[in-house]
Amino acid sequence: MPKGKWYCSGCNLARPKKSSKKSNANKEKEPPKDTKETTEKASKKSESTPTSKSKNSEKKKKEEKKKEPEPVGNVDLAPCGSILEEMQKHEDAWPFLTPVNTKQFPTYRKVIKKPMDMATMKSKLETGQYKSREDFANDARLIFDNCETFNEDESPVGQAGHSMRAFFETRWSELCST
């Protein structure tokens, strides 16, 4: 954590302004300001310049999306989120957490026509792009199929792929059979 006073960039609009020096006792007695008022004041200030208004409104929308709980539109997909979290925490998940770096592996896109990774799966799950459990499972299996296609079985990534496939299939059958 940084030393001294600091404010989250998202909370920067609600940051109290420096005023005359008050004692700590006076500060403690002051009731907390209503965040709605602070937000309204900040939005009025941002309306003065069109560029800051658009930037601030985009920033607020992104923050609101982060604060909102994940949509549970389809309860059928509940095991998918659990399995994905477990997979991401698995010790062999490291090669599959994010998309393959095509600058590091320039031939990857020539060999793998439909790349997939756990971050993409998480995004698809959160945005409701999976219509069924099987769509989710197909993407998970695609990760491991791509791994087998691109990596040798004895390589560290190849071994991680085999381990993760076994883990996924076990957990998938346990969670989805109920």
Image (spheres, rainbow, N blue to C red):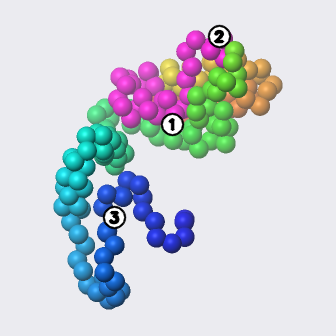
Mark 1 sits on what residue?
Answer: 84
Residue 140 position in % (x across, y down): 54, 25
- The amino acid beneath tag 3 is Arg
Mark 3 sits on what residue?
Answer: 15
Mark 2 sits on what residue?
Answer: 110
- The amino acid beneath tag 1 is Leu
Question: Which portion, as a residue range, is magenta?
Answer: 108-136
- Asked whether the residues under the numbered discs 3 and 2 touch, taking CB atoms below 8 Å apart as contact, a structural biologist would say no
Q: CA distance from mark 1 to mark 3?
A: 37 Å
Residue 30 position in % (x across, y down): 24, 80
State which quadrant residue 142 falls in: top right
In this orientation, does residue 69 appear?
no
Q: CA distance from mark 3 to mark 2?
A: 50 Å
- The amino acid beneath tag 2 is Lys
State which quadrant residue 116 falls in: top right
Q: In this image, 47 relative to 21: left or right?
A: left
- Asked whether the residues under the numbered discs 2 and 1 touch, taking CB atoms below 8 Å apart as contact, a structural biologist would say no
Reply yes or no: does residue 124 show up in magenta: yes
Reply yes or no: does residue 40 show up in magenta: no
State which quadrant residue 77 falls in: top left
Residue 141 sits above or below residue 6 on the image: above
> Which residue occupies 25% across, 40% down?
50
- Is residue 111 or residue 158 the one in the foreground? 111
Question: Counting residues from the N terminus, which is met first, the one under dot 3 or under dot 2?
Answer: 3
